[in-house]
Image (tube, helix red, strand yellow):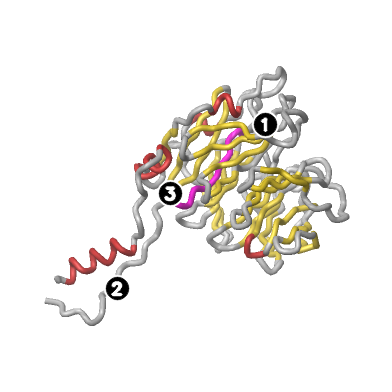
Amino acid sequence: MRLSALLAATALSLAGPTIAAGSALSDLAATLQPGTWAELQTGNIDSALSDTRTGGVGHILPYAEGIRWDPVSKKAYYIGSDDPGDGRRFVVYSEATNSWSVLPDPWSGTGVAHEYDLTDIDVTNRVIYTVLPDGFVGKQYNINTGTFSDMPSFPSMSYSCCEAAVHFPEAGGLLLLNKGTFYRLSDSSHSWSEFADGPTTSYHSVAEYNPTHKVVIFGGGNDTSRAFGKVASNGQVTALRTPPIDLESPRVEITTDPATGLYLVLEYGRRFYTYNVQTDTWTAQQTGSIPTAIWATEPDPGQLNTLATPIPEYGVIMYTTCMYDCTVFLYKHADRPTAPPSAPTGVNVQ
């Protein structure tokens, strides 16, 4: 075999498997080039996400940060409510049916409780955690059985409404942010303990796990909007440079790019940044190609009604947005990097 042909074959094998056809989501993801967006038309989205009570914004996405993707069941989960609204609601998008549905929940369609950044998923242990924003109580949803139960009693800590919770697999549990202190609910013992201390945060703070670099960035809040740090799996906290925007849920949407490990940050003032946690660097991105509906700030201009979840197996991010009507978009930030093939040894090259 000639060297050029062998190198080409080696490069193809290193690139990994291609996206298999079989769903509207995977097929659309396969068409995207880096930096491009495309609308994914999904079934029953307005019925699942809309809210008809007078006085609210008309859907259940406000006052929230993120939807949670389960790569095992190929479903995306969300819990939230309008304000005022018909009540806190638990919804799911299924790749298999390419549609949304409303799941049974403990709130039975009553009560208003915004999600903020207080819901996250533990894929390995098949659990979705959701902490109620006003008061130290929460629910956990068993994905396999489809049932809710109470989270273990919370530890004694200072009152702080509406902060953030994030599951950190390498740290072995769910982290709850409270005025800059993280408390951990252990995956193994199912008990709480203090985990780490960092920059002071306040209500509407954010926390986001990075599956590529195995860290959590956190900070922000209405009264501490430029506080910013990261925490490692051993509890070590590092203060980070002051970000160029206020970090407040629901005015920012932070997610990760599965191809590069960069954080992608949308801000309700129509700004888009990447954040490199390894170099502690923010980089402004072009916004001209972003669909207008992504900047869904109406009828409330003080928030961003767009939520994101990365879908690593397809190398894209799914953005769900509502502004009167609800829509899903897929965005591909970059191709997965591949190492250049090296010349194989022990081959007779002609």
- Report crowding for label 2: few under 14, some 14 to 19, many 20 or more residues within 10 A (C-alpha): few
Mark 1 or mark 3: whose residue is earlier in sequence: 1
Residue plotted at (51% across, 30% down): 327
Nearer to me, 199 or 346: 346
What segment is highlighted magenta in the picture? Answer: 304-314
Instruction: Point out the frontmost of discs 1 and 3.
Output: 3
- Report crowding for label 1: few under 14, some 14 to 19, many 20 or more residues within 10 A (C-alpha): few
Q: Quadrant of the N terminus?
A: bottom left
- Disc 3/disc 2 C-alpha distance (Å): 26 Å
Q: Give the residue type that dot 3 points to.
A: Tyr
- Disc 1/disc 3 C-alpha distance (Å): 32 Å
Q: Does residue 315 lie above or below 53 as drawn? A: below
Q: Does residue 289 lie above or below 6 as drawn? A: above
Q: Give the residue type that dot 2 points to.
A: Ser
Local secondary structure at mark 3: helix
Quarter-of-image position of residue 302 = top right
- Disc 1/disc 2 C-alpha distance (Å): 52 Å
Residue 51 location (% of width, % of height): 65, 23
Identify the disc placed on residue 314: 3
Q: Which residue is mark 2?
A: 342
Quarter-of-image position of residue 47 = top right
Residue 73 location (% of width, % of height): 53, 47
Q: Give the residue type that dot 1 points to.
A: Gly
Quarter-of-image position of residue 346 = bottom left
Q: Which residue is mark 1?
A: 302
